[in-house]
Image (spheres, grey):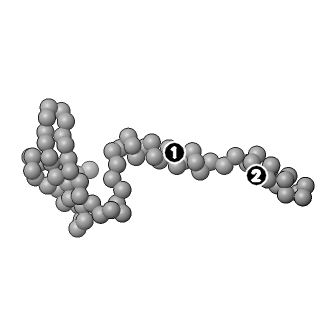
């Protein structure tokens, strides 16, 4: 992990497309501005984890649903 020290107004560049600017420091909070291409998804970590868990939950398949469909098709 790269650890950097920055002051308000200073930036961090990631590759050619992503730029992070330190906007404000108040006590224990740091406000950052992130400039990135539209196709790069940027989320707070807790939001990212929630999205990830929802995707995992949505991908789980209940096989009883397939059995019901199979039975319906067999009875036609």
Q: Is residue 14 above or below residue 22?
A: below
Q: Earlier in the sequence, mark 2 or mark 1?
A: 1
- Residue 15 x, y percent position in the rendering: 24, 65
In front: 13, or 38?
Answer: 38
**Label 2 CA crowd tier, 10 Å (few <14, some 14–19, many 20+):** few
Which structural element holds mark 1? helix
Q: Which mark is residue 66?
A: 2
Query: Disc 2 versus disc 1: distance between alpha carbons?
Result: 21 Å
Q: Is residue 64 left or right of residue 32?
A: right
Q: Is residue 4 left or right of residue 40?
A: left
In front: 25, or 13?
Answer: 25
- Residue 69 x, y percent position in the rendering: 79, 53
Instruction: Name which residue lies at 39% across and 43% down.
Output: 47
Q: Is residue 61 left or right of residue 33?
A: right
For the C terminus, the quadrant is bottom right
Q: Which mark is residue 36?
A: none
Q: Is residue 42 above or below residue 45?
A: below
Q: Is residue 39 above or below residue 66?
A: below
Total numbered labels? 2
Residue indicated by mark 1:
54
**Label 1 CA crowd tier, 10 Å (few <14, some 14–19, many 20+):** few
- Residue 45 x, y percent position in the rendering: 35, 44
Instruction: Name which residue lies at 40% across and 46% down.
Output: 48
- Residue 62 x, y percent position in the rendering: 70, 46
Q: Is residue 40 above or below residue 45?
A: below
Residue that sits furthest to the top in the current view: 27
Q: Is residue 48 left or right of residue 29?
A: right
Instruction: Name which residue lies at 14% across and 46% down.
Output: 23
Residue that sits furthest to the bottom in the current view: 16
Residue that sits furthest to the right in the current view: 75
């Amino acid at each position: 992990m790269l650890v950097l020290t920055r002051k308000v107004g200073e930036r961090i560049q990631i590759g050619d497309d992503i730029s992070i600017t330190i906007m404000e420091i108040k006590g224990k909070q740091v406000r950052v501005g992130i400039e990135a291409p539209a196709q790069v998804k940027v989320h707070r970590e807790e939001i990212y984890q929630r999205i990830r868990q929802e995707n995992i939950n949505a991908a789980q398949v209940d096989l009883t649903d397939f059995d019901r469909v199979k039975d319906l098709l067999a009875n036609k």
